[in-house]
Amino acid sequence: MSTLKAPNGKLITLLLLAIIGILFTACYPDNPQSTFDATGPVARSQLTLFWVIFWAAVFVFVVVEGILVYAAFKYRRKPGDGDPHQTHGNTPLEIGWTIIPSIVLIIVAVPTVITIFDNANSPDPEGALQVGVVGEQWWWEFNYPDPNDPDNTLITANELHIPVDEVVNITLDSRDVLHSFWIPKIAGKVDLVPNNRNTMWIKGEETGTFYAQCAEFCGESHALMRFWVIVETREEFDAWLESERADAIEPTDPLAKQGKAIFEGPQAQCWTCHTIKGTQAQGKIGPDLTHVGRRTHIASGIRENTQENLTEWIANPNAVKPGNIMFTQGQVYNDPQLALSEAQVAALVRYIQGLQ
C-alpha cells in the first residue's frame, strides 16, 4: 500500500510567495481602482490615515507575535519536565493589556475623527461649484447649475466634469437603493441613501480621466454601475458647461432622421424614458441623452461609445447590463411583435451618435 508523502517545503514556500505576490498586485498604483496614487486632498488624507492605521497594526502584530514566539520557545516543554506551575489570574498583566489597547485605539481614533470631519466639511461651502449626484440602478445622474440662469439645472449622466485645482461640493441622493460614490484616486466612499441627502467635497489636482464606480452592493448589475470623472482646465470646463445648455442637434442625415422618428414613435417609445432637449422626448426615468454622442462611454461607463457597442446595447441591453430597466420594462424587448429590426437599430444608432 502506498503512503502519502509529506509536502515539499520549498514548494510550499514558493506557493506562499506566489500567493502573496498576486495579492500585492492590488496595491499597484497605476491600477484604475488603486487608492495608492492619490490625486486630490481628500484621497490623500484618506491614504495618510490608512498608513497610520496600517503601521499601528504592524506594531501591534510584531509586539504580540514576538512575545508569543518568545514564550513558546523559552518555555517549551523539555524532556523530563513535569507539569508547570498553574497560575490563575495576574492583576498587573490584566490591567496592562486593558490600558495598552486603549492607548492604541486612541492613537488610531484621533486622526480618524480629524480626517472624517475634514472630508465632510468643505473648505469652500458657498463659493465652490455645486454638483448634484443622483444614483439609480445602475447609472449616475449629474446636475450642474446653469451659469446663465439660476433657475435652470443642466443635467447629464455617467460622466462627471470638474475644473482642475478647484473645490467641488457634491450632494448625494438615491432614487432607489443604497449606492456609494467612489472615485478611487480623488475621493470616496460616501453612501447615497434613499430619502437622506449626504454631502461631500472633492478636488482634482491633475487633469485627465479617472475611473469611478458604485462601491455599495445595489443589485444584479452593481459591478457595472461605473462612471468617469473628467478633470479639465477651467477654460475647458466652462466651454463644456456652456455647450450643455444647447438643445440637441437636429439630424440632417436621412438615416438619422429615421432614427429620430423611431425614437419618438409608438413602437420604441424611447422618449417616454429619456430626455433630449429641444424635442418631444422629456422622459425622466433614464439618462438624459441630449449630448450623449460626445460622451466617451455608454451604459454607465462600461463600454466605449462606438457604433458597434451602441448597436449591441440597443439590440440587447440585458446582455450588456443584466436586469436594467430598459430591458425589463421596454416594450420592444418584451413583446416579440414590437421587436426592433436590425435596420431600425442601425437608424437609432445613427441618430443617437449624432446627438453631439
Image (cartoon, rainbow, N blue to C red):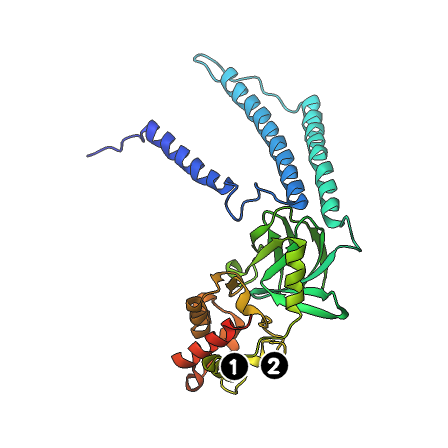
The answer to whether residue 189 is left or right of residue 352 is right
* Residues at circles 1 and 2 in contact by the CB criterion of under 8 Å: yes
Give coordinates of residue 181: x percent, y percent: 62, 56
| N-term-proximal mark, 1 vs 2 | 1
Residue 176 visible here: no
Q: Quadrant of residue 158?
A: bottom right
| Rendered residue at 58%/48% (across/down) | 184
Residue lying at the far right of the rendered structure: 126
Element assignment for label 2: loop
Q: Quadrant of the C terminus?
A: bottom right
Q: Which residue is mark 2?
A: 279
Question: Residue 293, percent across and down?
Answer: 53, 69
Q: Residue at x 50, y 71 (%)?
A: 353
Query: Closer to the camera, 160 or 116?
Result: 160
Q: Name the one closer to the observer, 341 or 64.
A: 341
In space, the residues marked 1 and 2 are separated at their CA atoms by 10 Å
Secondary element at tag 1: helix
- Which residue is tagged 1? 260
